Amino acid sequence: MRTRIRAAGVAIHNDCILLHRCLDFWVLPGGEVERESSADALVRECSEELGLPARVGRLLWIVENFFDYEGELEQSIEFYYELSFPQHAEIYKQSEIQGYEHEGDEPLLFIWQP
């Protein structure tokens, strides 16, 4: 069984939450922790994926998930933080945002979901 540590952000704006398409489902933005604190990982992921500086707020939840991925059992330990961006960032003016990285052949897609 593989264990992954992931950091994710809960960004809310105008009664909508920011989501990121990951393959065939939607998740909160974030990514894998790589030899850094979970808060630092979230800042790095936002910079890489959105090209934006992120402000990480308080830790909201720690979640442990077990799931089957391509026939293998995986464990994910996830840290969820409050997340915001600079007040006048363009991300707050768009309903769909194309990210800077790709998931397979598709560019990352972020949406504000009510």
Image (cartoon, rainbow, N blue to C red):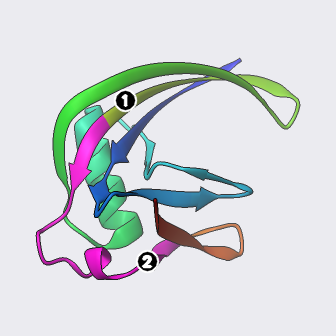
> Which quarter of the picture shows residue 80?
top left
To which residue does mark 2 refer?
95
- Residue 88 % position (x, y): 13, 78
Q: Nearer the viewer, residue 71 or 57?
A: 57
The magenta segment is 81-101
Helix, strand or loop status at disc 2: loop
Task: Decide if residue 82 is on the left or right side of residue 28.
Answer: left
Q: Amino acid at mark 2?
A: Ser
Q: Secondary structure at mark 1?
A: strand
Find residue 112 and name its label.
none
| Neighbour tally class for label 1: few under 14, some 14-19, many 20 plus, Cα within 10 Å | many
Q: Magenta stretch: residue 83 in it?
A: yes
- Residue 35 at what x, y percent from top left? 33, 34
Residue 36 seen in this snapshot: no
- Which residue is identified by label 1? 79
Q: Residue at x 18, y 45 (%)?
A: 56
Residue at 23% from the left image edge and 43% from the top image edge: 40
Number of numbered markers: 2
Placement of 10 over or under 100, stated as above or below = above
Q: Residue at x 24, y 42 (%)?
A: 82
| For residue 87, side relative to residue 98 (left or right) | left
Specify the farthest residue to the left. Answer: 87
Q: Position of residue 5 (x, y in %)?
A: 46, 29
Instruction: Measure how far apart labels 1 and 2 are at the Cα level.
Output: 25 Å
Q: Quadrant of residue 91?
A: bottom left
Callout 2 environment at 10 Å: few (<14), some (14 to 19), or many (20+)? few
62 to 82, vertically: above or below = above
Residue 97 placement (x, y as % from top left): 45, 77
Nearer mark to the viewer, of 1 and 2? 2
Marks 1 and 2: CB-CB under 8 Å?
no
Q: Does residue 104 show up magenta in the picture?
A: no
The earlier-in-sequence mark between 1 and 2 is 1
